[in-house]
Amino acid sequence: MTTHPDRPYPDAPRRRAAGPHEGAGPGPEALAAALRRAGVAEVDTSSRRRAEYASDASNYRVVPTVVAFPRHADEAAAALEVCRDLGVPLTARGAGTSIAGNAVGTGAVLDFSRHLHRVLAVDPDARTAVVEPGAVLDAITAAAAPYGLRFGPDPSTHARATIGGALGNNACGSRALAYGRTADNVVGLDVLTGSGVRFTARAGLGTPGRETGRAAELLAGLDALVRDRLALIRTEFGRFRRQVSGYGLEHLLPENGGDVAKFLVGTEGTLGVLLGATVFLVGAPRHTALAVLGYPGMAEAADAAPALLPHRPVALEGMNARLVDVVRARRGAAAVPDVLPRGDGWLFAETAGDTAAEAEDAARRLAAASGCLDSAVVRGPAARALWHIREDGAGLGGRTPAGAPAWPGWEDSAVPPEHFGAYVRDFTALLARHGLDGLMYGHFGDGCLHVRIDFPLAERPAVLRAFVTEAAELAGAHGGSMSGEHGDGRARGELLGRMYGPGALAALAAVKHLFDPDDLLNPGVIVRPRPLDADLRVPAATASPRRLAFAYPDDGGDFTTAVHRCVGIGRCRADATGGGAVMCPSFLATRDEKDSTRGRARVLQELANGRLVHGGWRSEEVAESLDLCLSCKGCAVDCPAGVDMATYKAEALHQRYRRRPRPAAHYALGQLPRWARLAAHAPRLANALLGAGPAAALAKRAGGVDPRRPLPRFAARTFRAWFAAHPPAHGEPLTLWVDTFTDHFSPHVGRAAVRVLEAAGYSVRVPDGPVCCGLTWLSTGQLDGAKKQLRRTLRALEPSLAAGTPIVGLEPSCTAVLRGDLTALLPQDPRAVRTAAATRTLAELLAGTPGWSPPDLTGVRGVAQPHCHQHAVLGWDADGELLRTAGADVDAVGGCCGLAGNFGVEKGHYDVSVAVAETALLPAVRAAGADAVVLADGFSCRTQLDHLAHRRGTHLAELLADRLTDTAPG
């Protein structure tokens, strides 16, 4: 094979894979049939699936021909062989969190995360782990944890990013100062090259007899290529730690051991398909502390970083104060610990020690030497909360403090740390010259800057090219790299000529030709790159659906802008229920991208651009995508970008069935308050008919209810009937919002609440009714009906609003409607804003009641299931604090109960409903024991507990009322 240093490719004949807008290869069905004949079992050609995989976490949209899910390495090899025979591009994908467009392609996309995700072995003596390419980084660490070990690199996506993606991009993360890059943590790789050669990549390039056959020929060619360019490689590659752009040819140098495994890390799937890996593990620190150092700005923080490296921090991260402002605005002040020192830019320096005292002492010494304005040393929950903000930087930075969308594209540059301060100043000036803004953060100890920038991609996409071209020149002038850990991808491959000379680029091309002569693997990346402004997703979204039911005030009233909040970082694929998060319960149950918040957002984005999903709101792709969305609203708060899929689903259902017949469940469950009022005239008869037997089976069938789901029993006496006979108490006036569930199914909760509120010194009143918040109409997309219900509600609440009395809700989902959806559905009604401001949860009201103290709950032990809507809209902090103050030992459970209003009752959802409950709630209840209290304010949560765990859920009002004494306040 002859190569030429001055030409990117030799003149040997080769197949050329079609680019995204070039000649067509086999169609979806033909390619899928070929893959199935070769033994690849799971292949999907549906437009819905292709929409889900058309984007990663970058700005790009490239629709694949097929998506396949290999179940073992042989299927991946078979898929590559088919692609080689047909000249079809192949792109390997893990969690799809690549920010530079590294995980999208036009031909076959292979998702390794679905089946090939095991940690096969851990060797604590050798400190290694053998893993499949789809293994999540946190899963590797969890498998190593019993031995006091962990996988070192920890990119912010470690809870969902796979080892294949980390190896592809040479991921680093916050703690790379201590543990190195992924390339520094690899032992060997099982690789299949684009030419069909399978071999084990490891150190020792040029070692005779290491491989045989075609593998030996490949490695001999690689060795010759390196030896012909020793001087070039030594001067242009590996100049500083975060020089990740291009290929890591420096690892192939004889003085570096000729390590082919390390070299292949960071090649972004352009040279080979990863089938397995052996990685190093590192010792986990016994204790850590966090020194938070305040500086006047980000440039001053960057100036200070190099001098702190001799203190050997585990991590040295930069954080912009404006990013924290975004967190406070979006999640409330309580989301940011009150420990941050003065400054507009901070360094987060993590130190380690064998004891907590050693770690804290190291942090104080580092702070004393930092020259900062102010500092704080924190541990425990406060430190974890600050790291949580840092890890959410990519999503939080997706909106500027003014609320404008911000994008990647130049989010990963790196320069030698000694030049970092000057680079940050020059980069800030460059932003100003282009009239752009960005929230900065990053790995300041390594000179790596992350930033999301408000490129006007929808209106003036040309600004992207103009800016990043100058930014590349600037990084090159400071001796830097286009990428510090995210890879070049489609975002920066075109810019490599600003960093490398012609000889270096030719060397990259020669390597590509050696491993992948037909340019099949991830074409358009690094070598022969696509234009950086080709295939952008946002400019393609030209159509904006009109006549919307929701106002979308934070997105300019535009549905397209709203669904493009999802930038694909994949937080919805992580199991964060242990930390109290809810999102995304259906994905945790099915592990299918279709059922992630991100997957749904991608389909809705295709609805907006009308190119892949046809039929608008009534398309089957949209219906399939949203079917298993529980409308839990968890994503509205747990997604750093603020995606609110429950709202989008309600809008989609509203538009799909507007003036058309609806599914039976929409009439039976979506208009439940009407049927409940009817049943209240003869509750015993209704219960007899619906409890069991042929009548119940017929009712379930007619109402679209799963036959395995028991129907709730109506109360013999409604709460309103009881309250009408209840003598009024003296005290401060208060309006109790009587929801349908409390009134007709759980009046005991209302009675307990009245007792607690009167004991606290309130005179309870209820609105004239019956009235309804419209929740069931809203969750089934009957938004015209929901608005009618809410207008009646506002009329009923007018006396309370005029008197300025607080409004207290007992059912979290209904209370959340009054606090949230009400203003989004009726934005022009001033009463809506006043109602939202006046509405409280029971715990919030009691916490703000002067002189009130809770009854003694000492000895109360158990678990609490905060309702999803409370978690997302109202917050559970007041409840938790009340319980702690009263002496109760109650642990809050993350995740969703799985019933989620009408979702778990509807036919076709039962199995997923049970699987969601098994994610967190049911295991927690079993572990708590039979004597534990199970707190659940939501009627759905209590119903699910009764059906699946045969446990009675207790409302907070009941718990407090049971402990009241005659001498209680009030």
Image (cartoon, rainbow, N blue to C red):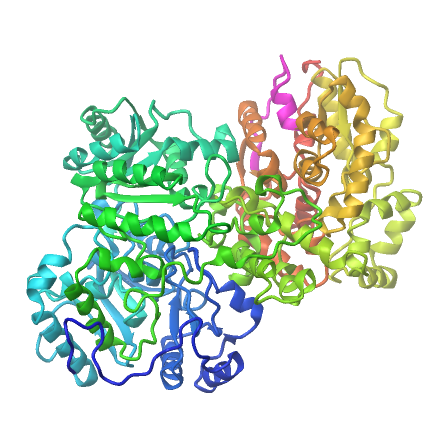
Left/right of residue 261 with respect to residue 398 in the rendered view: left
Name the one closer to the observer, 496 or 586: 496
Quadrant (top left/top right/bottom left/bottom right) for the C terminus: top right
Number of numbered discs visible in the structure rendering = 0
Q: Is residue 573 visible?
A: yes
* Vertical comparison of 310 with 27: above or below: above
Counting from the top left corner in percent of width and height, residue 959 is at 66, 30
Counting from the top left corner in percent of width and height, residue 613 is at 60, 66
Residue 132, magenta (yes or no)? no
Q: Is residue 592 visible?
A: no
* Vertical comparison of 782 with 730: above or below: below
Residue 848, magenta (yes or no)? yes
Name the one closer to the observer, 136 or 831: 831
Counting from the top left corner in percent of width and height, residue 550 is at 68, 44
- Residue 717 location, quadrant: top right
- Residue 161 location, quadrant: bottom left
At horizontal 36% and vertical 43% (from top left) the residue drawn is: 451
At horizontal 64% and vertical 17% (from top left) the residue drawn is: 849
Report the span colored magenta: 841-862
* Vertical comparison of 649 with 680: above or below: below
Name the one closer to the observer, 824 or 363: 824
Quadrant (top left/top right/bottom left/bottom right) for the N terminus: bottom left
* Vertical comparison of 219 with 738: above or below: below
Name the one closer to the observer, 501 or 359: 501
Left/right of residue 749 with respect to residue 67 in the rendered view: right
Counting from the top left corner in percent of width and height, residue 755 is at 75, 23
Left/right of residue 965 with respect to residue 765 in the rendered view: left
At horizontal 25% and vertical 61% (from top left) the residue drawn is: 279
Left/right of residue 74 with respect to residue 188 in the rendered view: right
